[in-house]
Amino acid sequence: MESLKKYLPTVLLIAGIICLLIAVVITVFAFTAPNGFGFEQVLWLLAAVLFLALGGLVIYLAVISTTVTKHFFLYDKNTGKNIRPADLTFDIVNRRMTGFMSRIATSERQAWSANIVGSNDERFGKNDVYRPLMAYKMIYDLTELNTPEHWTLFSKADPAVVSSICDALSSNDDAQLGATLVFLREHHAENIEKISRFFMDNRAYMQKQMLKYVQAHIDSMYME
């Protein structure tokens, strides 16, 4: 299948050129017929027009088949192609989600204070496919920053914000993580050390979940 995709544009281009050449030959034949121009020549010209249209269409398809649709997570600017979903890495997902978050929130503080995850923002995509990923990203970014100031974004967050994150994670069958976050916020909001330790201990888990989620929903993600 991959081999077919690789050579398809070339095959279509050759087929299109052949159709155009046939159209030219038929046209020349129609106008140089020894018995003059008549009904038979009209039919030949109609055939030439059909081959001309067919050739143009096939060449157009050849051009379209070489155009790469830039997938939000898979497109590689260096190669100008989309990588395979199996070759996707967490670093790519994290980097792209950093760009995604910058479109929605101006800072981590706004993300944690405005309950963006619980909003109806259309940028979450069809069926809110980006909402769980946004929830993971908000949590993961705290582990990257790893400062008391940023841990308080969680510990001082409105319960509605944490509840929205919990709901988003639950929609990805990750209710346990969401429930633990709610528990930490409700019962250990003043224990920054306990909060930071839990987040940092689960850093690798969140990396795995983000990558796994994108790969599982790759066909629903944005094209650019």
Image: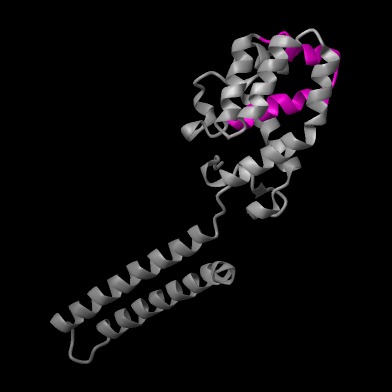
Task: Name which residue lies at 79% across and 18% down.
Answer: 195
Pick the residue in front: 158 or 15: 158
Q: Is residue 118 magenta?
A: no
| Apparent side of residue 160 relative to residue 19 in the rendered image (left or right) | right
Task: Determine whether 6 is above or below 186 in the image.
Answer: below
| Apparent side of residue 191 relative to residue 88 in the rendered image (left or right) | right
Pick the residue in front: 66 or 176: 176
Task: Determine whether 191 is above or below 78 in the image.
Answer: above
Q: Is residue 153 magenta?
A: yes
Q: Residue furthest bottom?
A: 34
Predominant secondary structure, magenta span = helix
Task: Determine whether 203 is above or below 148 in the image.
Answer: below
Where residue 84 appears, as percent x and y from the top left, is 64, 55
Quarter containing the C terminus = top right
Quarter containing the N terminus = bottom right
Pick the residue in front: 137 or 37: 137
Task: Name which residue lies at 51% across and 30% down.
Answer: 128
| Residue 176 can be seen in this image | yes
Task: Name which residue lies at 59% across and 12% down.
Answer: 160
Tag count: 0
Task: Determine whether 177 is above or below 84 in the image.
Answer: above
Q: Which stretch did the figure color magenta? A: 131-157
Pick the residue in front: 38 or 223: 223
| Apparent side of residue 196 relative to residue 24 in the rendered image (left or right) | right
Task: Name which residue lies at 73% across and 42% down.
Answer: 90
Where residue 210 appears, as percent x and y from the top left, is 67, 37
